[in-house]
Structure formats: structure tokens, C-alpha cells
Image: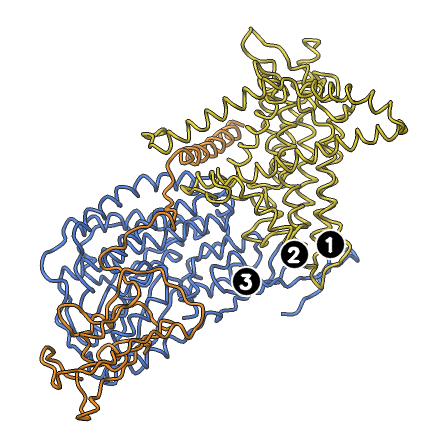
Amino acid sequence: MATELIRIPGSDFQTEEMILNLGPQHPSTHGVLRVVLKIDGEVITAAQPDVGYLHRGTEKLAENRTYPQMLVISDRWDYLSAMSNNLIWCLAVEKLLQIEVPLRGDYLRVIMVELNRIASHLVFFGTYGIDIGAYTPFLHAFREREKILDLFEEVSGARMTYNYIRIGGVMADLPEDWIGKCRSFLEWIKPRFVEYDILLTENPIFKDRTQNIGIISKEDAISYAITGPNLRGCGISFDLRKDEPYCHYQDFKFDVPTGKQGDCWDRYWVRIQEMKESVKIVEQALDHLPTGVPNAKVPRIIRPPVGESYAQLEAPRGVLGIYCLSAGEDKPYRVHVRAPSFINLTILQKILVGMKLADVVAILGSIDIVLGEVDR
Amino acid sequence: MIFPVLTQSQKRSIGVLALMGLIGGGTAMAIGELGMRLTQIWEFLLPILQKLPIPEMASQIAGMVIECSLLIGFISVSVMFMVWWERKVSAHMQSRLGPMTTGGWHGWAQTIADGIKLILKEDIIPESANSWVHRLAPVLVFVPAFICYAVLPFGSNLIAVNLDIGVLFIFAISGLSVLGIVMAGWGSGNKYSMLGGLRAAAQSVSYEIPRVLSIVPILLFVGSLKLTDIANYQSGMWFGFIPRWFIFYPVIGQIAFIIFLISSVAETNRTPFDIAEAESELVAGFHTEYSGMKFSLFFLAEYAYVFLSSGLTTALFLGGGSGPLLPTWVWFLLKSFGIVFLFLWFRWTFPRMRVDRLMEFTWKFLMPWSFVNILIAGAVVLALGV
Amino acid sequence: MINYFKTIYQVSKALLQGMAVTGRWLFQPAITVQYPDEKLTPPERFRGTLVFDKETCTACNLCVKACPTACISLEPYVDPATQKRIAKVNWYQIDFGKCNYCRLCEEACPTKPIKSVRHSHDYEWSMKERSEMFVKWKRDPSPVIADTPKDTGTKAA
């Protein structure tokens, strides 16, 4: 990307393009992402995301880990929603092993994944507020997230890398009184959504910053394989929980919120609505939590038959998929992760062009990437 | 519920605050008018100085030095207080506590500790920076802020220089600061800094206009640019209970106040108008490359401007130091810090505006309305013959 | 024209509502826990630092195999008199620089009723050097009286 001279027609005055490195050390790249921007004044003429600063080679690591051990690594992909990562790995391995998880196990998984979705979207809400320049929503969101993490800590023993959902079920059944705590949390968070709407969603300055900015058209979204809230923000109602239910998602009643035109505000709004839907799902799951054991019988040493499996689920950031190839050993032969953040990030170079420099962080934030997942 | 059931610690803090208020108010009343006291001290000292075998010039210079150091002392202490206050206010708005340990009581010494840290820090000049411009910029930002304090009336008879063109002087001098910001942006040799500096220049120049225009109605009523005249004009009551402050002038006062407040926030580069610093976009804008004492000068200047704007708002719209019971300087400080609190409140509530929207806002919204306000005020002045 | 004023009204209303929210929280008690002075009790399942009980360990190697980062190593005790391996450890080492705190070792441990390697509730731990991260438990120098272990059923896998 070399700079070019920009000639202003009808005058001998000329300006020069400037290359601006946004990141890898920058307050609002949400990790170590580098975006090489070519700017003319404050207008972006070209943008190129440069990923890989957080690459840890987890797909290769999987080849040297047994199936339960890989679960620990999976926590580290999308560290804001580690439950989804745990779940997708388990789903893929269970497909290989052809294990049926008991109903209670599935419900527990749904509860955890949905709570984690709320936690993940809360981080998005907070950090997006900071990207736009509002600091208070960030700590308000983290205050609520802290309560979710407390719940997770009680159930799994850790706050970020849960390792809770296991092959064939979950690590352990719910501790005593956990349901009551979870319910009181749900009651606590419901009025908070109203505050969030006042603080950001309906704030005129925020709307001004995000509406009609970074519009992704439906065609683009499909051709770039965008998934998750980013896709639904464009107005396409695609949600694996509805379209291809796993873990008995068909038992729950919830809506799939969709945006109108696919701008930053729509993507943001979809996430806020999804949190409300997740609260509904968790409530239903707690109401109808089946009794029984949560775990299926799993062999002590997991040695799936030769074969391959692909499992996918609706993670907070989009469709998270695992392609797992077994050679009949206790370690997978090859693993591929379809990381939604990475694929969603690819559209950045298209929608950034023509935007203002101040919009870069608004657009980047609205795509909601987690660099741990982008680089894996 | 707005007021939850008070816990023991809250009751205690309310008690402590009330006690402090009582002690402070008592002390203030005991001191009385600070301007009067200072004049008394000066009148007491002057004959002694005249008797001493030193030229008259020296005693005058000594007086100036004393005045300057009083102002510098006031700026430093008020900035320290404001920084601490901002941290506490922002913390409590975000369900946090803020600094709690330094100094014992609610981290009151945090800013002092920070100041010491900033002085001790290494002073870095980047290789790509223009060394002289880089060094000069913080001074050029701070000095105008300091000069402006000279004409700020802190109370009756408590003003360093009572200029006839006080208002104009403040606007003219504080406008110079943008030069320092642009120099800081350009001289740092950093792209982010440069963008921040350019943004600051555009913003300050644009917001200066509605800011000045918004107070033209006041000048129409008062007929003077002298800040003490303006403050005196607002003494007294309407119907015995509404103070004759400009903010209470129907329609005109409110429009002028809002425009002035908004452009003051923009002038001081604070959220929602902090596009020059814009942490999430430009890292730290024009002061990205500054460290140590030079950075703290920027910091000092920012808060000095915040208090300056608040003090100006108080003098122009809130009747300066007028108020019952307490001496005028206390009233002035109370009102000014009230406005400072508004600044903090804005900052910790609103997101940042975008550059082009910011410009649109001032040129397409604030400017026309300040013209309309001048028109109304002119009509009122003509009709009533004030 | 009416729309213009309506927009102004709506915008100012929304902004003032936002200020009301932050203003309300200003008077709510903070949720901060002032850590060194106040401490939360970790929940029952909390995964703190690993503790090891060298008396009950049977040197079965299951934890070594379970660990995803291979941070555990051990050496079974060989009785110098008989040159036989007995179900005791000679030394047991955990490299806390690599430990994931994932509980797989604790789950793999077969000793009952208390696992010999398990997570404690302790989380205040810091090291200054990498070498300190290797925590080694050594067998007591006192000789083992019983040649054949009676209380442990499992042999090395």
C-alpha cells in the first residue's frame, strides 16, 4: 500500500495520502489487531486488517491432545464465551462417538451457553460504549457481567476458562441454591436493560455515531459468509438455534431479532435484543429443568471410531463450527475451527472504505471480534 | 428508587460532609470578604514597604508577584481538587469507589501523589519530534489559561486586574491555547497527534464563535465588557425571591446559557466534544507523545480551563458572587464548582460526537440560535429601553 | 418547522434521561470489594492453586496423563532394599508456569475419599522467578516400614 498523490481537479493544489497503522497497540482494536488504513484527510481510501498477532496454533495443538484435554484449549478461543467453545467441541466429539446426552445435561448446557451469551454481549455493549466515547456503560455492563461470572464460578470453579461442559454432559450438576441465585440475577438484569437503552441505544449522540455507518448489504453479508448478530443486523433471520436446533433448543420459545439495514446501530441493537431473548431462554430452561443425571456414559479413554464430524452452533459472535477428523486414536487426527470472528472480520476491508477515521472504531467495534478467536 | 435506605457508612459520610460544610461555612464567615481582607493586608504592608529603603518599583513588583503566586496557588489547588473530584464522581456513577487509600480519607491525596509521580517521570522527546515545538507547546497551552485567571472576579473586590474589556480579554487569550495544541500535535511527529491537533484547531475556532455570540445579549443589557459590571448588574431580586441572574431572564437567558455551556464544554475539549483527544480513536490525540511534567502541564491547563469556563459562566449567568449569608468568594466558588460538576456529569454520561457532526452542530445549530437570541435581546432592549 | 422543535425536544429529553441514570447511580452504594481489606470467600468448586498430598498418592500416573499441558511429573518410589516399585511417590512436581487450573488432574486422581492432587481455595500466590514455579514435593527421608502397600488398591497404570 503505497501512498498516492491526490490531485484536486481544477487546481494545482495537491495532497498526499497518509498510511495510518491502527494497532497492534491501540486502545480500541479489542486485542492485538492491526488495521492498515490509507487515509485522505479523515476519509479512508483503503483498509487492510492484519491478523495473527495472537496466533497460538490451537488447531495444531489439538493433534497432540486427547479429546478431553482439547476442551481446556477450547476455552481460549473466544475467551468471552468459553461455554460455547466447550459446547461445540463436545458436540463435535459426541457426533463422532454417537453419544446421546441426557435431557438435563442439554438443559444445563443451554442455561450456561445463554448466560454466557449475555455476558459476552455485555462486554460488547460496554466496549462499544468506550469505542464511541461513553465510559460509564462499560462499568455498568461489567458490574452485571461480574454477577454472571460469579454464577459460573460457583458452578465450574473458574471465571473465564470454565471447562464446564464436558464430553457426554457437564462437569457436575448444579450446586445447591444455584437456581435461586440465577433467578435473582435474571430479575436484577431486566431493569438494567432499560438503563442501557437510555444510556446508549436511544442516546441521540450514539445514534448519530452509529446509524447509517458501516452498512453491510444482504448480498455482501451472504457472500462474505457473515454470521451471527452481524448477519441478523442486515435483516436476514438466520439463527442455528432456530434453523438447526441442537441441545433441544426447539423446546424454548424465543424470537430472533433482526435489524433493518445492517448499519452499526442495527448490529448493536440486535445484540441488545438477544440478551433479552437469552434471559427468556434461561428462565424457561430453569422452569422446566428436567430431573435425572446430566451425564451420559462415556468411556474412560475416548477413542472415537475412524471418521469425521462437523458440528456447528450459534455462538454469541456467529456460527462456530468444528470439523474434527478421527483416525481411531485417542487424539484427533485434524481439527479445524470455523471461527465466526475471523470470518466476520473479512468484511472490514470492504465496509471501511469511504468512511471517516472516527467511524473505524465504531465499525470495528460493531463487528465485535475477539482476537483470541480470530487468530486462534 | 432514587434514595435507597442509607447504610451505616453512608450515614457516616453524610454526617462528615455536613460537619465539613458547617466548619467550612463558619470559617468562611469568620474570614469574611477575602477581597477586603487582602486589601487591608496590602494597606497595612504598603506604608512599611514605603518606609524601607527600596524603590517604589520594587514594592509594586512584589505586589504583582504575590498576586501571581496567589493565582498559581489557586489554580494548582483547584485543579488538584477537581481531578480528585472527577475521579470520585466518575467512580460513584459507575458503582465504583475510586481512589480510597492514598492519604487515608477517601484517597484525598491521590492527585498529590500523581503529581509527584508526573514530576519524577522521565521526560521523553520522540526522535521524530521537532524538539523546540514539542517543548514549547505545553507552555503555550498553559500560559493563556493562567493569564485569563487575572481578570476573573472571584468575589467582590477580589480580582487581580479589573480590565474594562474583561470578557473580550478572556475570549481572546484563551483562544491562543489552540496554537499550543496544534503545535503539540504537529511537533510530536506522530500521525495520531497530528490528527488530534488539526481536529482541535477546527473545533476550537468553530466553537469560539457561538460562545462569544451567546453572551452578546448580556452585553446588550449591561452595556459593558467589564466582568465586575456584569456581576454587579445581576445583584438584587425580582419580586423579592428570584435573583436577577441572567440565567433567569426569560428565554434569552436560558438560550444564551445553554449555548454558552455547550460551547464551553467544547472549548475545554471534554466529552462529548473531546475529539481532539478521543482516546478510542486517536490514542490520546495531541498529547500522545507527552510524558512527565509536560503532560501534566496539558492536564493542568485542561482543568484550569474547566474552572475558568465555570467561573466565567458564574460571573456571566449566575450573578457572580451574589448570595445570602456567606461571603461573595464562597458563593462564587460554590457556583463555579456546581458548573464544574455539570462538566463532569456530561463527561461521564455521553458518548463522543463525530468530527463532522460536531462542526455541523456548531455551524448549523448553535450559531443560528445565538443570532436569534441576539435579535430577541436587541428587540427587548429597544422595546424596554433597558 | 414543528419537526425541528420536536427533534430538539426529543434529543434534549433523551440526553437528560441519560444524565438522570448516571445521576441516580451516583447515589447508589458502590459494589467494589476493597480487596486486601475485604475478601470474598471462593465458592466450593473454586479452582485455586493445586495442593498435593504425598502420603496418599499412589504414583498411578493418571494425573500426568490427564494434564493438557504436561506440567505434572512424578517419580514412583523404588524401595532400595527390594528394587521394587511401590505405590508411593519419590517426588512429585507441578510446573505452575504451565498449569491451566483446569481440574482434569483432580478428576483423574483415583485416591479416595480425598484426592491426593486437588485444587485448594488459595489464590494469593506469586512467584518472582520461573524456577520458583516448579513446585516439588519430595518423599520424606524416613524409610517406609511396610514393603507392600495395604491401603491402596490401584497400581500404576
CA separation in Å, label 1 and label 3: 23 Å
Mark 2 in CB contact with mark 1 (< 8 angstroms): yes
Q: 10 Å neighbourhood of mark 1: few (<14), some, or many (≥20)?
A: many
- Taking the image as shown, residue B82 lies to the left or right of residue C10, namely right
Point out residue B214 in the picture as x, y percentages from the top left corner. 66, 27
- Considering the numbered disc 3 on the image, is that residue within a helix, a strand or a loop? loop
Identify the residue at horizontal 59%, vertical 39% (top origin).
B80
Residue at which label 1 appears: B134
Q: Nearer the viewer, residue A223 or A120?
A: A120
Residue A234: name its quadrant.
Answer: bottom left
| Chain A tint as drawn | blue
Name the amino acid, label 3. Answer: Gln
* Among the 4 quarters of the image, the one containing residue A47: bottom right
Question: Residue C131, position in %: x, y?
Answer: 42, 75
Residue B231 drawn above or below residue B367: above
Q: Colour of chain C?
A: orange
Q: Which chain is yellow?
A: B
